[in-house]
Each structure stands twice: as C-alpha cells, then as structure tokens.
Image (cartoon, rainbow, N blue to C red):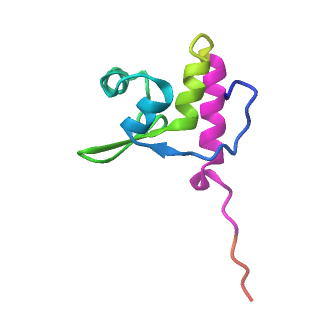
Amino acid sequence: MMGSHSTYPMNPQFVSKNSLSDTIGLSPETFKKYRLSGIWIKGIHWQSVNSRCVLYNLPLILDWLANRNSPQAHQRTIEAYLKALPSNQPKRGRKVS
C-alpha cells in the first residue's frame, strides 16, 4: 500500500472500472460519483479515453484510499506523480555539430 512516504516514479497503471472495482471493492457507480463531484480529479485520478471509456490511475487511487484522512499526504503523492510525468521532465538540448 502506498502512503505519504512513497516516492515517484510510481508507474501509472490505468485500469478499467471493472478492474478497479475488483481491486478496491467499490462499485463503478461510486467511481462515477467521485468523478462528477470532483473528489477524483480528471487527468490525475482518471482519464477519459473517449465518450465511452474512462480509465483510472490505480496507484493514485490506492494512495487516495490509504490517505483519506490525510489530504496533505495524498497531495504530496499527486505532486510527485505530476513531477515524474515525461512531459514535466527537463528538455534535453540538441547538440549542434
């Protein structure tokens, strides 16, 4: 289980609602409620692939579950996740010969 002491890079593993439900024991309807209410953040906890497919970031949702009583701890994990994304890595300059 991940907690506030976990460090990234945490490999994002995006899973379907059914896989997530099997893993954490909550219903897909609950996931929808968390998405629509803003408890789970689009682009962080979940991604919309298209109008019919939503995938969930399993490591971050497990961390959210473990840290429900410590939002600051979960926020640190979110920040580490974002920092570790390839799009947030320093750009390497081209060598001109």
Extreme-front residue of the structure: 22
The answer to whether residue 80 is magenta is: yes
Q: Quadrant of residue 31?
A: top left
In the figure, is residue 66 to the left or right of 20?
A: right
Give the residue displayed 55% in from the left and 21% down from the top: 65
Closest to the observer, 47 or 14: 14
| Residue 83 rendering spot, x and y as whole percentages | 64, 43
The answer to whether residue 30 is magenta is: no
Question: Which image quadrant: the N terminus?
Answer: top right
Extreme-top residue of the structure: 69
Extreme-bottom residue of the structure: 97
Give the residue displayed 66% in from the left and 37% down from the top: 80
Q: Quadrant of residue 94?
A: bottom right
In the figure, is residue 74 to the left or right of 43?
A: right
Give the dominant element type of the magenta stretch: helix, strand or loop.
Answer: helix
In the figure, is residue 21 to the left or right of 77?
A: left
Closest to the observer, 21 or 9: 21
Q: Is residue 84 above or below residue 36?
A: below
In the figure, is residue 30 to the left or right of 83?
A: left
Q: Is residue 62 above or below residue 91?
A: above
**Callout count:** 0
Question: Which image quadrant: the C terminus?
Answer: bottom right
Give the residue displayed 35% in from the left and 24% down from the top: 27
Extreme-left residue of the structure: 51
Q: Is residue 81 above or below residue 71?
A: below
| Residue 79 rendering spot, x and y as whole percentages | 63, 34
The residue stretch that appears in magenta: 72-92
Q: Quadrant of residue 21?
A: top left
Give the residue displayed 41% in from the left and 22% down from the top: 26
